[in-house]
Image: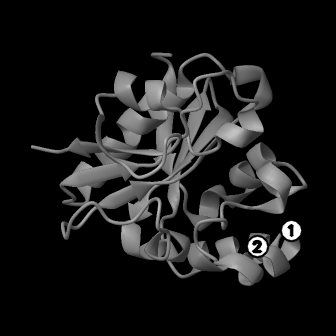
Amino acid sequence: MSDLSFHPLTRNLWNDFEELFGSHGACDGCWCMYWKLRGKAYDEAKGYEARQLHKNQLNDGIVTGLLAYLHGDVVGWVAVEPRAAYEKLAHSKILKPVDGQEVWSVPCFFVAKKFRKQGINVELLKAAVGYVRSKGGKIVEGYPVETGKPIAPPFAFTGTASAFERAGFKEVARNSPTRPIFRFVID
């Protein structure tokens, strides 16, 4: 995976994001808006509207995450922004804030089917930490799923605990048996 490169998603890379997510928008039309909209608002936006909402954020100059490339082909995505950007997190009892510190969140991933199970999520996490460091952030937080048994990739869109561990993150809280909260503290 040493040939991977990472680029912040900006409007000039939108076509690559669309290529990666496909015409249906990755996981059930989410377009990586699942954590940004709550309940009914998300359900009503899935598909084209979620696509447009994400695109509008890029048009407003907001970087919503990083794309991974291998030999010029887009192969993966990680969402990474300050936790305040994710409305659903603000209202989650299971993923409630650990403390009052300012954190950046890594709530979801998407890797092209033929590149899965090759460690790209680990590299995306490392790239996210580097990106947050470049923006002056001090804590990167993630919310993987940990079921103790294999999970189909579409249900592991938040990442796995083992990927976070391999990227140097440490578990800091667990309010549910299957949903730990991991952090990477930047020194």
How far across and down, in percent of the image, does residue 31 sit? 73, 61
Looking at the image, residue 53 lies above or below residue 120: below
Badge 1: few (under 14), some or many (20 or more) residues near its Cα, within 10 Å?
many
Residues tagged 1 and 2 counted as in contact (Cβ below 8 A): yes
| Residue at the disc numbered 2 | 50
Quadrant of the image occupied by residue 36? bottom right
Q: Front-most of 177 and 114?
A: 177
Distance between the Cα atoms at labels 1 and 2? 5 Å
Q: On the rendered structure, is 32 left or right of 91?
A: right
Report the residue at 33% width, 60% height from top. Answer: 104
Q: In the current view of this chain or complex, which residue is farthest to the left?
A: 187
Q: Quadrant of the C terminus?
A: top left
Query: Amino acid type of disc 2?
Result: Ala
Looking at the image, residue 104 lies above or below residue 145: below
Report the residue at 29% width, 44% height from top. Answer: 183
Query: Amino acid type of disc 1?
Result: Gly
Badge 2: few (under 14), some or many (20 or more) residues near its Cα, within 10 Å?
many
Quadrant of the image occupied by residue 146? top right
| Residue at the disc numbered 1 | 47
